[in-house]
Image (tube, grey):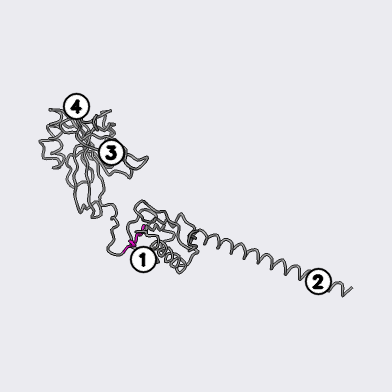
Amino acid sequence: MASLTHKLHYFLRNALANQICFLHTTRCVRAFTHSTRRLQLYTDQGTHANVLIGKVDRFGGVTVVLGESDITSEISDGGFSKLLRDSLVQWRTEGRVAVWLHVPLSLSRFAAVASAHGFTYHHAHQDKATLALWLPAGPSRLPGFATHQIGVAGAVVDESNGKVLVVQDKNKTVNAWKFPGGLSEPGENIGTTAVREVFEETGVRSEFKSLLSIRQQHDHPGAFGLSDMYVVCRLSPLTYDINFCTQECLRCEWLELAKLADTNATTPITSRLAKLLLHGLNRGFDKIDLLMEELPAIYSGRFYQLYHRALPQALKQKG
């Protein structure tokens, strides 16, 4: 009986040990398989070299978005450095001219790793920084980041009485009359910005008619030292009742154009545009308007807005 009990104990102990070994082996195989799969994501099938996956643009550059790849925080700095080094060798062999590396905040430590390979910051936006590297010999020919911000104002002219909608900003040191306006949002057309800003500041609804002027100012204090483009559009009112935003505006009125053109209680650009609008009101807005026409770009599926003086119909038909 004792012998039988001893054999049974031996059998159970071995069976348990084998099961533990099997479970451990299964986990190891799964971990190895996962690691192998991850490495395969960076394998170029033509060369069998471990490289980062990137999208090649029409200029011959490569864009790599770490946040959209299988790169995780588990990868060491040394592992990422080797992967990036091998990728750069591969891209130079292929004749690529530049690399754009998008690094999310969650992987920001890889920016320091990339800098050791020559990458520099190009720009940052919200939760992502973009680093760049020019691959050929000689100085970089990569374009800089956006150099201008776009501000848009709307001059809403009531042609029935010669009045224009103006505001006085609440937070300005000098409370001068000006046209309502603000910064254009990314992807927003100039006319759309003007209509939106006018409504947000004054409560008056309007529609875009034309572009009147563009002012360019460098080293603008409100643009982080970059340049500022200030565009003034002519709008036509759809409503007339004022319900202005008290957080942004101190006053809002329909003011006669002739008075606005003659008063000192305004800005130089507003005074100049008031004279231009008065000229258009008296002689015809076709004398001052830059009309907008949407034309197809050379890239499929894209369009752009072109602003220019109206062409004679005969010339327009020839185009």
Which image quarter: residue 233? top left
Viewer-nearest residue: 106 or 69: 69
x, y (%) of residue 111?
39, 63
Which image quarter: residue 162? top left
Q: Residue at x 50, y 64 (%)?
A: 74
Residue 56 vs 308, above or below: the answer is below
Q: Are marks 2 and 3 in contact (CB under 8 Å)?
A: no
Which image quarter: residue 316? top left
Q: Are marks 2 and 1 in contact (CB under 8 Å)?
A: no
Q: Are marks 4 and 3 in contact (CB under 8 Å)?
A: no
Q: Which mark is residue 314?
A: none
Q: Earlier in the sequence, mark 4 or mark 2?
A: 2
Viewer-nearest residue: 262 or 295: 295
**Residue 132 included in the magenta stretch of the image:** yes
Q: Which mark is residue 9?
A: 2
Helix, strand or loop status at disc 1: helix
Helix, strand or loop status at disc 4: loop
x, y (%) of residue 64?
41, 57
* 42 horizontally vs 133: left or right: right
* 40 horizontally vs 121: left or right: right
| Mark closer to the observer (4, 1) | 1
Q: Residue at x 85, y 72 (%)?
A: 5
Identify the residue position indicated by label 1 in the image.
115
Mark 4 and mark 2: span between their CA atoms? 103 Å
Pick the quarter of the image with the N terminus: bottom right
Q: Which residues are magenta?
A: 130-136
Viewer-nearest residue: 306 or 9: 306
Identify the residue position indicated by label 3 in the image.
305
Mark 2 and mark 1: span between their CA atoms? 62 Å
Identify the residue position indicated by label 4 in the image.
159
Q: Earlier in the sequence, mark 4 or mark 1?
A: 1
Is residue 47 visible in the rendered image? The answer is yes
